[in-house]
Image (cartoon, rainbow, N blue to C red):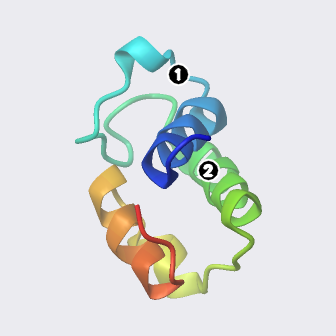
Amino acid sequence: MPSNKEKYIETFVNALSIEKKNFKDDIKYNEIPEWDSIGHMTLISALEEQYKISFDTDDIVDFSSFQKGIEILKKYKVEI
């Protein structure tokens, strides 16, 4: 069974339609063309579905990088 980190990476790769081999864990919002405002909402929606949570607006706005997302998910009792 995949770990939470593996699921988190998979969600990023799938939601942003990037190749897994091109994924880096220092990825940041707007740093790659795929992670624009539309990609961001797709990612947020996919993470909410994956972890059965609902982000509040401030967290959606603050979700600016892969690493920041790990911090935000901790607030929702999701350990990566």
Element assignment for label 2: helix
Residue 44 appears in which quarter of the rendering?
Answer: bottom right
Element assignment for label 1: loop
Percent position of residue 77, x then y: 51, 83
Taking 25 as reference, is 13 left or right? right
Q: Residue at x 28, y 39 (%)?
A: 25
Given residues 50 and 33, the one toward you in this image is 50
* Residue on which disc 2 sits: 43
As displayed, is residue 48 above or below residue 75? above
Q: Residue at x 33, y 54 (%)?
A: 65
Nearest to N terminus: mark 1 or mark 2: 1
Between the residue at mark 1 and the residue at mark 2, the CA separation in whole angstroms equals: 12 Å
Callout 1 touching callout 2 (CB < 8 Å): no
Percent position of residue 66, x then y: 35, 51
What crowding class fits label 1: few (fewer than 14 Cα within 10 Å), some (14-19), or many (20 or more)? Answer: some
Amino acid of disc 1? Ile
* Residue on which disc 1 sits: 18
Taking 47 as reference, is 34 left or right? left
Amino acid of disc 2? Leu
Taking 16 as reference, is 25 left or right? left
Q: Residue at x 56, y 36 (%)?
A: 10
Percent position of residue 78, x then y: 51, 73
